[in-house]
Image (cartoon, rainbow, N blue to C red):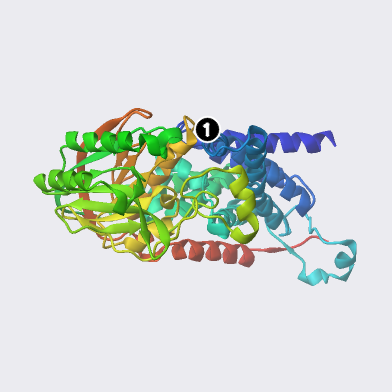
């Protein structure tokens, strides 16, 4: 019994340690080590339910330590009472932990070399001995567990609108495994990390040299892929200015201070000296038609004088619907992009007829009932570029970002992470944008309210960034790119073909069971 609790504590702390693999810490080997611990623990329990509970303990450590910033959004800025906000954050972490639990349960359903079949005594009696089979330890650790782990990560990033935050691959924005991103996307990077964890677990238990060989091959393969240029520069570089207004969230939507907010951004845009100037999500926290004409004229005149455009976050109203949008001002005709992937409970309320009254009682979120923009929207044709805009949370979904490619030459993220205070959320979010740059072979320009405002190269490298929580203008140079990475062409289909192939190979290499 004591060993059982030790296993759960070890799984919990291994999950919590994973968080240090992500930004702002960047200790990317840690998640691989932590997952290898979980894989070993899974091999030391006798039932699928026990493996599931170990996965849940691991997930509770990972998400409990990794998404604490949700409490800040709920309590500090959403107005939710402290006990309720703490409980909601804990329950959400516990819910997310169900996905690692499912991975543990699913892998345990496969009979392994230790002779555990996890069937009831009655089913065992009915089983035909000639049909019994098992997977060897290398197949379990090197193929089955990593495959199931990544498939469940994808499920977490898809079901109920998806929450792919802390997907294992994001920890490797700066590691050799990042080379797999342009080929298989972030889940492909997760797969490389998970197979590495399996190889490491196999070596720990058997001292098999082939496990170290597999580990070396994976990391060397990623490093070699980083040398491939999947896309090509298009046209001349252009000057860019990313504006960070640093408007505190608790006053951002205060109507009495609206004039100060507008003046702040007008002043910063006036100081910027670039062909393309980008302002954050809802930099102007009012409707487009309510913007003062003098402000609009000023933006257009300044942009046209530089031969370019200003892109700014603002709300729009059309056909009785409200949208979180990006609007252009300047030399090009006015265009807009409307956010497609909304944040549940922040920008819309699921099952509104049931949950609406309850949510409205405990949360105070301005413009919390927004419509979704069209799933296919053309890039913004500004400053001689085709800019694929994405607003805040949207850059978490790589399979959605590639809809605008290969037409788009630049990516731009407009966000307001002021909701999360001084937590690690902004750094984690910036790291997610690095993977989008890697997947697409495009530069990513991030304009944020309080940070991280950054220019990210097509290779995922952070070229420049502003200090957080202070106003400023990030002046730099951006290069448009053309062409398509394998991930842009195939999306997640390439990953699923690989996962299916790995499972098929494991099945073909199965062995007769003893007894």
Image point (45%, 60%), residue name: 371
Q: Quadrant of the C terminus?
A: bottom right
Image point (25%, 60%), residue name: 483
**Residue 337, image quadrant:** bottom left
- Measuring from the top left, give residue 113's x and y in whole percent: 73, 54
Image point (56%, 37%), residue name: 79
| Observer able to see residue 438 | no
Q: Nearer the viewer, residue 471 or 229?
A: 471
- Measuring from the top left, give residue 301's x and y in whole percent: 13, 46
As displayed, is residue 490 above or below residue 65?
A: below
| Left-right relation of 1 to 422 | right
Residue designated by label 1: 20
Q: Nearer the viewer, residue 57 or 279?
A: 279
At mark 1, the secondary structure is helix
| Left-right relation of 142 to 322 | right
Numbered marks: total: 1
């Amino acid at each position: 019994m004591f060993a059982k609790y030790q296993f759960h504590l070890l799984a919990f702390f291994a999950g919590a340690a994973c968080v240090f693999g992500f930004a702002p810490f960047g200790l990317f080997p840690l998640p691989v080590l932590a997952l290898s611990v979980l894989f070993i623990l899974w091999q030391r329990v006798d039932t699928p339910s026990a493996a599931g509970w170990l996965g849940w303990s691991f997930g509770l450590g990972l998400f409990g330590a990794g998404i604490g910033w949700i409490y800040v959004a709920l309590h500090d800025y959403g107005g939710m009472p402290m006990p309720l906000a703490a409980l909601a954050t804990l329950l959400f972490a516990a819910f997310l932990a169900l996905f690692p639990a499912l991975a543990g349960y699913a892998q345990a359903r496969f009979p392994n070399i230790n002779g555990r079949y996890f069937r009831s005594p009655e089913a065992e009696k009915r089983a035909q001995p000639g049909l019994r089979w098992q997977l060897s330890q290398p197949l379990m650790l090197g193929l089955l567990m990593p495959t199931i782990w990544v498939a469940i990560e994808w499920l977490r990033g898809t079901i109920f609108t998806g929450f792919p935050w802390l997907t294992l691959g994001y920890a490797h924005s700066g590691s050799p495994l990042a080379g797999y991103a342009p080929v298989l996307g972030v889940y492909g990077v997760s797969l490389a990390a998970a197979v590495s964890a399996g190889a490491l677990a196999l070596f720990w238990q058997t001292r098999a040299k082939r496990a170290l060989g597999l580990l070396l091959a994976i990391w060397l393969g990623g490093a070699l892929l980083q040398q491939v240029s999947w896309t090509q520069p298009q046209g001349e570089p252009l000057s860019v200015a990313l504006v960070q207004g640093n408007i505190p969230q608790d006053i951002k939507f205060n109507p009495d201070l609206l004039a100060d907010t507008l003046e702040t951004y007008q002043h910063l845009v006036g100081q910027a000296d670039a062909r393309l100037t980008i302002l954050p999500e809802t930099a102007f926290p009012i409707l487009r038609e309510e913007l003062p004409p003098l402000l609009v004229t000023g933006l257009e005149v300044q942009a046209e004088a530089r031969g370019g455009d200003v892109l700014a976050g603002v709300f729009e109203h059309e056909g009785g619907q409200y949208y979180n949008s990006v609007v252009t001002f300047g030399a090009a005709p006015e265009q807009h992009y409307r956010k497609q992937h909304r944040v549940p409970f922040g920008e819309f309320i699921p099952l509104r007829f049931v949950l609406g009254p309850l949510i409205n009682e405990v949360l105070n979120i301005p413009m919390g009932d927004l419509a979704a923009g069209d799933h296919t929207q053309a890039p913004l044709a500004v400053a001689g570029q085709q800019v694929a805009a994405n607003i805040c949370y949207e850059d978490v979904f790589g399979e959605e970002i590639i809809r605008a490619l290969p037409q788009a030459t630049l990516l731009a993220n407009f966000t307001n992470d002021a909701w999360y205070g001084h937590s690690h959320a902004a750094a984690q979010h910036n790291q997610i944008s690095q993977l989008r740059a890697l997947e697409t072979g495009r530069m990513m320009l991030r304009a944020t309210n309080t940070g991280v405002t950054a220019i990210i190269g097509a290779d995922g490298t952070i070229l420049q960034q502003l200090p957080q929580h202070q106003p400023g203008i990030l002046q730099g140079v951006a290069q448009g790119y053309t062409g398509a990475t394998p991930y842009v062409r195939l999306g997640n289909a390439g990953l699923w073909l690989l996962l299916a192939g790995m499972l098929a190979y494991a099945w073909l290499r199965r062995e007769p069971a003893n007894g």
